[in-house]
Image (tube, rainbow, N blue to C red):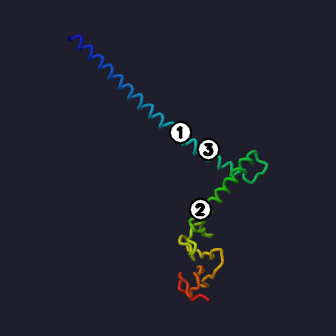
Amino acid sequence: MSQFLDGIGKRLSDAGQGVARHTRNFTEVTRLNGAIAEQERQVEALLRALGQACYDRYQDDPDSEYAQQIKQLRAAYAQIAQYQDQIRQIKGVRLCPACGAEVGPDSAFCAACGAKMEPPAGGGRVCPKCGSRAEGESLFCAACGAKLE
């Protein structure tokens, strides 16, 4: 009986050592995968910086070996700008010409830098004092209170 129990004890001990070895291996693999991911992030950042430097250097050279890629980048930037314009139209905002901040459609001044905003494009009356669009047949400006002419 003692021999039988000793055999079970040995098997349990061996199994425990196997589990510990697998746990150590799993931990080490996880650590190495994390290190690989960090190196890949660094490589990606370096390639992005290298690509930007290449673009900056050759963007005005039509005979560059990178002319096709630069053309594609410009097309992508133009498409991004169109999408951003569509988003601003949906949101009903415009860009401040001085700082680029988003400004409400009826704002006379930019909240970010204080620059005077041109009245929005479109018909209708405009306040002579602040440049806000006048609503309907109002006699006074809703933004600044000035008498409308």
In the rendered image, the vertical position of residue 67 relative to residue 97, given as above or below: above
Answer left or right for 82 relative to 67. left
User: At x 57% / y 81%, what residue is drawn?
Assistant: 135
Residue 47: which numbered mark, if any?
3
Examine the image and state in which quarter residue 119 appears.
bottom right
Q: Mark 1 and mark 2 in contact (Cβ < 8 Å)?
A: no
Residue 26 on image: x %, y %: 42, 30
Q: Out of 74 and 124, give the one closest to the viewer.
A: 124
Upstream in sequence: badge 2 or badge 3: 3
In the rendered image, the vertical position of residue 114 relative to residue 74, given as above or below: below
Upstream in sequence: badge 1 or badge 3: 1
User: At x 30% / y 17%, what residue is drawn?
Assistant: 11
Q: Amino acid at mark 1?
A: Gln
From the image, tell me which residue sits under label 2. 87
From the image, tell me which residue sits under label 1. 39
Q: Amino acid at mark 2?
A: Ile
